[in-house]
Amino acid sequence: MTDLVFGPMIARIMSNATLPNQLDVRKLAVKGVEISAEVPISSLPRVIDLLASDNGLITVKLDFYIDEQRFKRIDGQLKSRVEVFCQRCLEPMWVEKDADFNLAIVWSEKDAERLPKSLDPLIVGEELTEMYDVVSEELILSLPFVNYHSAEECGQVQGYISADPDAIVDAVEEPKENPFNILAQLKQN
């Protein structure tokens, strides 16, 4: 850990190879700690279920501090490269995703309701905060809902209609016979 002195304030910068799973986020906010670390995808079971493999790393930068409104905060950045499935050909593909998030550390749901709309709540109790759960949640929120290879790379391009309106051919359908026509004939008789 490195201490940097800025006038009366001391900022601590921690640089670990991997992020500790459990942290006391309130104390880190009071101390003004910044953490840069890596989280292996294989350590995030909720995320693995959404991916093609558990290969890859997430680079995490977390800034713990108390803001001008006296909220204890975590501002974070995630940089990830994960392997997902293409929804057309169902083959694995790599997706790079960056995400920024702003969390306010609160004790209860009632405290969370008082937060400004720009902040998401991180409700913590007396115990340590599971940071891998926080990283998992933010990564899940940042991943695209549907993933596709580019048209040149995808192995299953044929069989799909082009999104190009000039390439769409209008199919002419013959009018179908109304099944109630028989009832109309019976009613006339």
Image: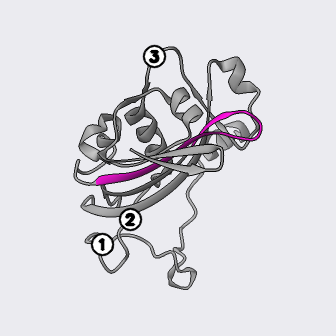
| Picture residue at 55% right of the left edge, 76% below the top | 170
| Picture residue at 74% right of the left edge, 32% below the top | 115
**Residue 184 image offset from top left, x and y in percent:** 68, 42
In front here: 64 or 53? 64
**Residue 46 image offset from top left, x and y in percent:** 34, 35
Q: Residues within 10 Å of mark 1 (few under 14, many from 20)?
A: some
Residue located beneath label 3 in the image = 127
Above or below 18: residue 156: below
Residue located beneath label 2 in the image = 148
Q: Amino acid at mark 1?
A: Cys
Give the dominant element type of the magenta stretch: helix, strand or loop.
strand
Q: Residues within 10 Å of mark 3 (few under 14, many from 20)?
A: few
Lower position in the chain sequence, tag 1 or tag 2: 2
Labels 3 & 1 near each other (Cβ < 8 A): no
**Residue 140 image offset from top left, x and y in percent:** 44, 44
Q: CA distance from mark 3 to mark 2?
A: 41 Å
Residue located beneath label 1 in the image = 154
Lower position in the chain sequence, tag 3 or tag 2: 3
Q: CA distance from mark 1 to mark 2?
A: 8 Å
Q: Secondary structure at mark 3?
A: loop
